[in-house]
């Protein structure tokens, strides 16, 4: 892997924040449901719940409990107490992001609520890294979640209907992923760049094919990242979108190819990684918790072990609502990218 | 007004970010509906729309148009072009914050979606100021909106019902407010501190009395702000909550009095300012756009004229959803505070 040609120095180039003082990842944790725990990444998740209700009265409060548990576990791994968390950055898919806000009520630390649909984990990492890098925080928590049943009844049909879904549809993961970041020099894993996406909308209106809707946004942000940093794809061991799944990922690859960018087999997608073909998840996984748990589980653990040296994590979000869909609007999408590396392996 | 005793220097004290390199407000604009334009602040708003549909096909897209128009007007006042806006920070009350995301699609700049209910404008100002102060951005837009009819049908009843509302209820304002921030030294108005709130929930469950629900969060953040900065109430000409309205504001005053803090007649509330008693708005105004438009309209203009020297703007948000309410949950609330001053009048 060639060294990055990006110039060191604080500030911003194009759409990309450059963290000369790179925040570190002190702890990360993933909490997932039974279906996700039965998938190919089973061994990488910290907690696999036996059911989707977690002893709560509602799926919504179950999702909120997953958020809280993921944050507490990431804090424990980081050796940071709740009271030493300067800010909690969180968001989810639910109307008024209630999974996050109810968890924040219990965690009881200064709370910054975010919304970027399935790009939310990347957004939380980007903003959290900026706050730590600038010295406005010492410890920051970034967390995001989704829950199959809360999303299904909010976005699509009451779950009792058992509606059929086309094969282009994705399966909202029941999962939460949390990361605790700390100051530069505190750990091997460092967050060096964050590329913030524009809203891209190619007039796709089918909410049962969000991969196709999000692919142009993913490609737009990846192109911007390479332009801003001067990096080429081989700067990264993996470029991980989350979640374009089986329909959207090849489209993003085509759009990048049109720009002369070939990511090759380092281009993977959280939505394709979280389920296997026996699990009837159609195009693959989706939901804020899918990319959050794959990041906090598989990616952070492989980076920490040095098996991955540097990764570009590209969260992709479809920003429509059921109301905008019913009103005939197309689906505006966004993608945010964060570059994470093992500093011990990559050097300075 | 005594000088602040807060120590200069970058970083954070308690819940408060201290902007030693204080970002400046280069432009601000407010766009409101007919009812808001007929109220006591009529003369302070930049644009008063004659109807609530703005020539759009839906109220939701009308709200989105107000966001776009407010941003463009703030940019024009700032002398900043769309393409020179590094980030747009935006949020609103709608499910999946579609008013913001559809506006961001048109504005076409890197977009950070936020959710803090009616605290969103303060949240956008706080995060935007942090990004500018740290050198991660040169120009940042912060915008928030609400629309009476989009909120009414989403949170309460189809508007055709003409439901009766209790006198403790607030009236969601049809309004948007936008601010363009720039680097230190570029203008008189500077944003010096941002205090990020915790989620506070005193087990209030009545969504027709959100002032009572939010008052404890407002008091909690105001107490934290004074503790962190060493300032006393007389450091500010106005301490402006948005929006506790007629029921919540006295409660917040009582809670502060219990802590030995008397804000006196410098304690005002956007929800009480935006309508007068003849307008049948019950407890007063609410909605992200209420505090955003009062900030961008009345407060910024009076600060710029030197009639106000220093203001603490405290956005307050009720973070519940109709789903959480129907499930019997109480209303978690949050408040974020930003300190803005006219540097020419206040000196260094």
Image: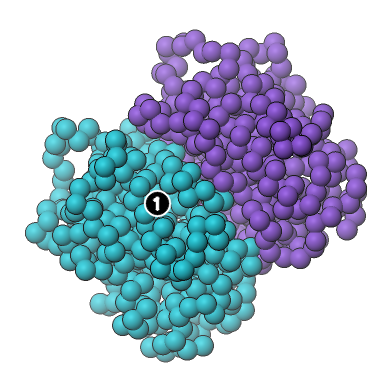
Chain colours: A purple, B cyan
Q: Mark 1 points at which residue?
A: B68
Judge by depth and name the residue closer to the eye, A337 or A73.
A337
Query: Which chain letter matches label 1?
Result: B
Judge by depth and name the residue closer to the eye, B108 or B253.
B108
Secondary element type, mark 1 = helix
Q: In this view, does A100 lie to the left or right of B335?
A: right
Which quadrant is home to the N terminus of chain A? Answer: top right
Residue at the spot x=82%, y=29% of the render?
A265
Q: Taking B110 as reference, is B58 above or below it?
A: above
State the image coordinates of residue A216 (x, y, percent, origin top left).
Answer: 61, 34
State the image coordinates of residue B62 (x, y, percent, origin top left).
Answer: 31, 44
State the image coordinates of residue A79 (x, y, percent, origin top left).
Answer: 73, 52
| Residue B256 occupies quadrant | bottom left
Task: Please rate how many residues cluster around mark 1, counting C-alpha atoms within 10 Å: few if below 14, some from 14 to 19, many from 20.
Answer: many
| Residue B306 occupies quadrant | bottom left
Which quadrant is home to the C terminus of chain A? Answer: bottom right
């Amino acid at each position: 892997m060639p060294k990055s040609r990006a110039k060191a120095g604080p500030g911003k180039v194009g759409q990309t924040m450059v963290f000369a003082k790179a925040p570190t990842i002190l702890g990360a944790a993933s909490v997932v449901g039974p279906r996700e725990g039965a998938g190919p990444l089973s061994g990488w998740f910290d907690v696999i719940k036996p059911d989707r209700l977690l002893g709560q009265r509602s799926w919504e409060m179950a999702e909120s409990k997953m958020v809280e548990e993921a944050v507490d576990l990431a804090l424990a791994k980081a050796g940071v107490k709740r009271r030493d968390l300067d800010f909690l950055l969180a968001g989810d898919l639910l109307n008024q992001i209630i999974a996050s806000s109810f968890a924040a009520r219990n965690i009881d630390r200064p709370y910054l609520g975010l919304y970027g649909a399935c790009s939310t984990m990347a957004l939380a990492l980007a903003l959290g890294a900026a706050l730590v890098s600038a010295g406005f925080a010492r410890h920051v928590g970034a967390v995001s979640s989704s829950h199959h049943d809360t999303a299904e009844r909010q976005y699509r049909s009451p779950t009792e209907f058992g509606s059929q879904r086309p094969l282009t549809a994705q399966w909202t993961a029941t999962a939460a992923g949390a990361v605790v970041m700390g100051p530069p020099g505190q750990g091997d894993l460092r967050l060096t760049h964050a590329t913030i996406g524009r809203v891209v909308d190619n007039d796709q209106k089918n909410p049962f094919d969000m991969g196709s809707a999000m692919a142009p946004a993913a490609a737009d942000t990846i192109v911007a990242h390479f332009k801003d940093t001067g990096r080429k794809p081989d700067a990264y061991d993996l470029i991980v979108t989350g979640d374009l799944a089986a329909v959207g990922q090849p489209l993003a690859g085509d759009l990048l190819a049109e720009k002369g960018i070939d990511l090759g087999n380092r281009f993977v997608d959280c939505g394709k990684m979280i389920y296997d073909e026996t699990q009837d998840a159609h195009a693959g996984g989706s939901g804020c918790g899918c990319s959050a748990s794959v990041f906090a589980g598989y990616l952070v653990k492989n980076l920490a072990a040095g098996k991955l040296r540097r990764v570009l994590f590209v969260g992709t979000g479809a920003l429509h609502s059921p109301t905008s869909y019913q009103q005939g609007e197309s689906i505006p999408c966004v993608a945010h990218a964060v570059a994470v590396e093992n500093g011990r392996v990559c050097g300075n």
